[in-house]
Amino acid sequence: MPHSDPVQSLDPAAYASAPEATAANDAATTEAQHKRDFNKLQKRLRRQTGNAVIDYRMIEEGDKIMVCLSGGKDSYTMLDMLRSLQRNAPISFSLVAVNLDQKQPGFPEHVLPEYLDKLGVDYHILERDTYSVVKEKTPEGKTTCALCSRLRRGSLYGFAEEIGATKVALGHHREDILETLFLNMFFGGSLKAMPPKLLSDDAKNIVIRPLAYCKEADIAEFSRQMAYPIIPCNLCGSQPNMQRQNVKAMLDDWDKNHPGRLESMFKAVTNVAPSQLADREQFDFENLEAKQEAALSERIQAFNVG
Ligand code: SF4
């Protein structure tokens, strides 16, 4: 076989093509590595979504899941994860995407219908001018997000009922849950977060959060690689909620400087010991003496029998 080494062959063309071939090889290796990393990321997100769905029995046979799609990275990722689950789960359930057009100036109305048409996903665009209500009711200089979210939730829950959806899926992830935990502790004086599954106050809707176990950074990277047509939330011109931003920065800092801390904190949310806290509603501190008496007499009885 002829030797292809350019030094051996003394072929000028071979001299020219050697660096090009090396560059092409490097590019192919990098590309293959990217693909492997993407597959790993996708698998992780799918696995975590599947685990959350199973752990909290979020989806049952015959469910009609209304997937709330805002056009942000989280909701696009959630739709993707639920579609994958739908293809692979041993049960059958349907998905319908719903976007609330809040009539914010500059809202790109065509983006989501085009995206969903291309996917072949059933969807509704719900038009409600919550933007005007929020602008009218919020005092100048105050953040509008709290009222906006409340109105949005009300519109979506009502619509879920109208279309006969059995579950309402929201795209909150692990960091949303932890941020809410700290916001409630810092400003609300209560130890509560955002549950993976929730019955609405009027008992008409069951809300599920299939991305509850997923890290925000993973979702952000997945969304970037999927090149979703992102619609920004702040079209309304509102300042982002400063307290939430501060808590977010605190968590980001911990995640960078204390690896494993967020994982441990999330585990804590799933592993509560009411007897080690101080909530009299959650644990009967008043009757510990009676409990003690019962435990002691049980032990004496066991001793006498033995
Ligand atoms: S940024 Fe604007 S659209 Fe988004 S939640 Fe806040 S008020 Fe609503």
Image (spheres, grey):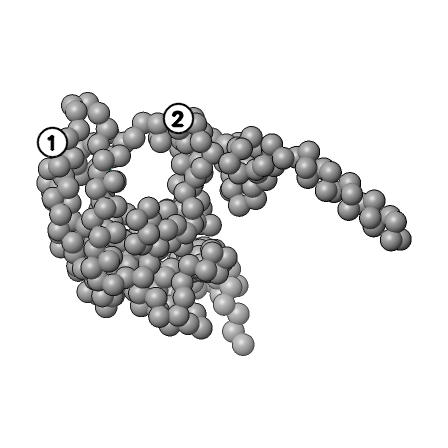
The number of numbered discs placed on residues in the rendered structure image is: 2
Q: Is 133 left, or right, of 76 in this rendering?
A: left
User: Which disc, if any, is residue 136?
Assistant: 1
Q: Which residue is mark 2?
A: 187
Pinpoint residue 67: horizontal percent, then vertical percent: 29, 57
Choose between 225 and 144: the one closer to the eye: 144
Ligand 1 within 8 Å of disc 1? The answer is no
Q: Earlier in the sequence, mark 2 or mark 1?
A: 1
Q: Is residue 277 above or below residue 120?
A: above
- The structure residue drawn at horizontal position 21% and vertical position 42%, both measured from the top left corner, is 151
Q: Is residue 118 above or below residue 184?
A: below
User: Which disc, if any, is residue 5?
Assistant: none
Q: Are marks 2 and 1 in contact (CB under 8 Å)?
A: no
- The structure residue drawn at horizontal position 35% and vertical position 31%, both measured from the top left corner, is 244
Structural distance between the alpha carbons of marks 2 and 1: 26 Å
Q: Is residue 157 above or below residue 146?
A: below
Amino acid under disc 1: Glu
The single residue placed furthest to the bottom in the displayed view is 1
